[in-house]
Image (tube, rainbow, N blue to C red):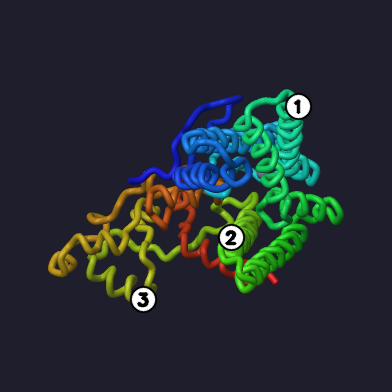
Amino acid sequence: MLKRKMALFKLLGFTVSLDVSWGIILFLVVWSLSKGFFPSYFPGLSMQTYWIMGVVGAIGLFISIIIHEFSHALVARKYGMKIKGITLFIFGGVAEMQDEPSTPKSEFLMAIAGPIASFTLSILFGGLTQLAETMKFSVPVIALLSYLSMINLLVAVFNMIPAFPTDGGRVLRSLLWWIRGDIHWATQIASRISLLFAVVIVFTGFMHMTGGNAIGGLWWILIGSFLFFAANASYQKLLIKESFEGKTVRHFMNPAPVTVPSHITLQEFVDMYLYRYHYKMFPVLQNGKISGLITVQMLKLHTHKEWKHRLVGQVMEEQNPSNSIAANTPIDDALNKMNESGSTRLLVVEHSKIVGIITLKDLLEYIALKMELETIP
Ligand SMILES: [Zn+2]
């Protein structure tokens, strides 16, 4: 399988990885700096110099973004949020949080830390540019410093666009959350504002395009659409997370599933159970106790002729760690287990006794219902 990201290095306990999309962006940055930005603002240098400036500029941008993400990660860690690592991808970087902030204050500080870092870098490089100019440094050095000052300001401003899940969107949500003390409401309002902003950005893009600025307009449309989908997706993710918060397998299991006795033949099983209930999995009852399960897949391994004399008890799968789960498992972990094992139906076990079954279908139907009742607007 193709790996989407590549681990680069570890610093202060965080692993920094590179998404494959960054390869493309890196090339584009070097190319547009060497062919466009530097020659037009600082003319008269050799092509070789421009290429070197382009590479150094891209490395500077790369380090700046890592510093931006590290500020998020460090503040998050200070407030007890677990950070899986830092990944650089096509639209900059992302500090991958494992859990959501628990207070408006921690979310606010965590979110604002990145733009503050970028803004500070911008001022720092701006000061260095001034210094380099007064000390009559060579043109490439001045050009690079002023580029880094400008690009960091751009990163800070772009990230402060209040469109969830950008830093600005998170800042907005934390303020709303703080005002009413209701994270659910805050998320909903922040998402609506985000979608509005995204639409405005796309609209601005169309205005630029009709005004003759095709490339510029396309960029606005691209960024606007990205923000639109990201805002929508992160809101839905949050809704799912919220609806599963603190809930365990027990909440969603079927405590009285239709069971099949082990002593009937496969043919009887098909006629009396499969065609009647249309489930894909049935727990099997042996001596009055559930001891395993039978699925449509297992049935398919035997010919119709065999169905006549083979018993359910001979074909069934005994209960084992891969087809069962403890009743007190958090739903998140149950979903992970289904995802990893590929089995979407599990036996639920409590004190080494089977107390029910849980299916992915039930979980999905629950999410769909929840979405229908709470989706925006
Ligand atoms: Zn950020």
The residue that label 1 is drawn on is 134
Mark 1 Cα shell of 10 Å, populated few (<14), some (14-19), many (≥20): few
The answer to whether residue 307 is visible is: yes
Q: Residue at x 51, y 33 (%)?
A: 49
Amino acid, disc 3: Arg
Amino acid, disc 2: Trp
Give the CA distance from mark 2 to mark 3.
56 Å
* Place of residue 53 in the rendered image (x, y in percent of width and height, measured from the top left): 54, 35
Q: Secondary structure at mark 3?
A: helix
Give the CA distance from mark 3 to mark 1.
87 Å
Mark 2 Cα shell of 10 Å, populated few (<14), some (14-19), many (≥20): some
Q: Residue at x 72, y 42 (%)?
A: 115
The residue that label 2 is drawn on is 219
The answer to the question of whether label 3 and label 1 lie on touching residues, with beta carbons closer than 8 A, is no
Q: Nearer the viewer, residue 203 or 366?
A: 203
Q: Residue at x 55, y 43 (%)?
A: 33
Considering only order in the chain, which callout, 1 or 3, is on the residue closer to the N terminus?
1
Q: Secondary structure at mark 1?
A: helix
The answer to whether residue 375 is visible is: no
The residue that label 3 is drawn on is 276
Viewer-nearest of labels 1 and 2?
A: 1
* Place of residue 228 in the rendered image (x, y in percent of width and height, measured from the top left): 62, 63
Name the image quarter holding residue 186.
Answer: bottom right
Considering only order in the chain, which callout, 3 or 2, is on the residue closer to the N terminus?
2
Above-or-below relation of 166 to 370: above
* Place of residue 20 in the rendered image (x, y in percent of width and height, measured from the top left): 44, 44
Give the CA distance from mark 1 to mark 2.
36 Å
Q: Nearer the viewer, residue 221 or 347?
A: 221
Amino acid, disc 1: Thr
Left or right of residue 121: residue 213: left
Left or right of residue 321: residue 299: left
